[in-house]
Image (spheres, helix red, strand yellow):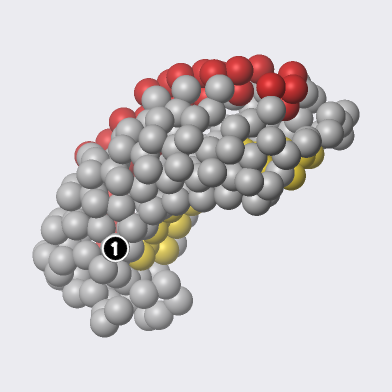
Amino acid sequence: MISVPRTSAPHLNLWKKHLGSVPEHVWEQTNLETLILADNDLAEVSDKIGNLKHLRTLDLGHNQLTSLPDTLGELVSLSDFLYLHDNRLTSLPRSLENLKKLRYLNVSQNAFTLLPYCVSHLPGLVELRTTDNALTELPASIGNLSHLRELHLRNNHLNSLPTTIGHLRELRQIDLRGNPSKPCPNPSPTCQSWKNWTSAGSQPSPLHPGSKTWKPEAV
């Protein structure tokens, strides 16, 4: 195993160290505010991750994770970024709904067919990325994310969106490229006021106030 020195610094970057597993002493560094474990061939994460009560940013992307420990939900200070992309996840612990301060969540490039329950119960989310999964629908509870400004849904299997999408009053960007073209939900007054409903990132919106259908631009 690669030697990982102990540190009292609040930030630990172990990106692409080919660890295979996380050294036990990492879970003892309870002062950590940033922990980067991306691209390390990790197949599991110890439930001792719950010891890191001061974490604000956690990166577990680009690994081989099929599940996450329930103790991840104990990281209630996690407020900046949680990267879980490019793994083999099909579900998330329900305990993650305790991360009320979390503003950015990336669960792209996994194997989700449904958006995990906990995701739509994270009221602090400003940006949600769930591209390149196998989502067939979004729950009505997506409308709970009242602070959401960016919603990235590219390359899924979505045929429609719930009408509660119109509750997202702060939404400024939605990326729906790579999904089947189906009618947009009946536009609510909120939905009609959106200026940047988009299927292509920075491109002009194909859905303007008063429009009843959404048509994706060519990918």
- Foreground residue, 35 or 151? 35
Q: Is residue 48 above or below residue 150?
A: above
Quadrant for the C terminus in the image: bottom left
**Left or right position of 21 against 109:** right
**Left or right position of 70 against 25:** left
Q: Is residue 29 above or below residue 101?
A: above
Residue 27, horizontal then vertical, whole percent: 69, 22
Which residue is depicted at the point 69% across and 35% down?
1
Q: Secondary structure at mark 1?
A: loop
Picture quarter containing residue 208? Answer: bottom left
Which residue is depicted at the point 26% across and 82% down?
218
Which residue is depicted at the point 19% across and 57% down?
157
Residue 23, horizontal then vertical, whole percent: 69, 28
Judging by the rendered image, the residue that carries numbered circle 1 is 155
- Foreground residue, 108 or 24? 24
The three-letter code of the residue at mark 1 reads Asn
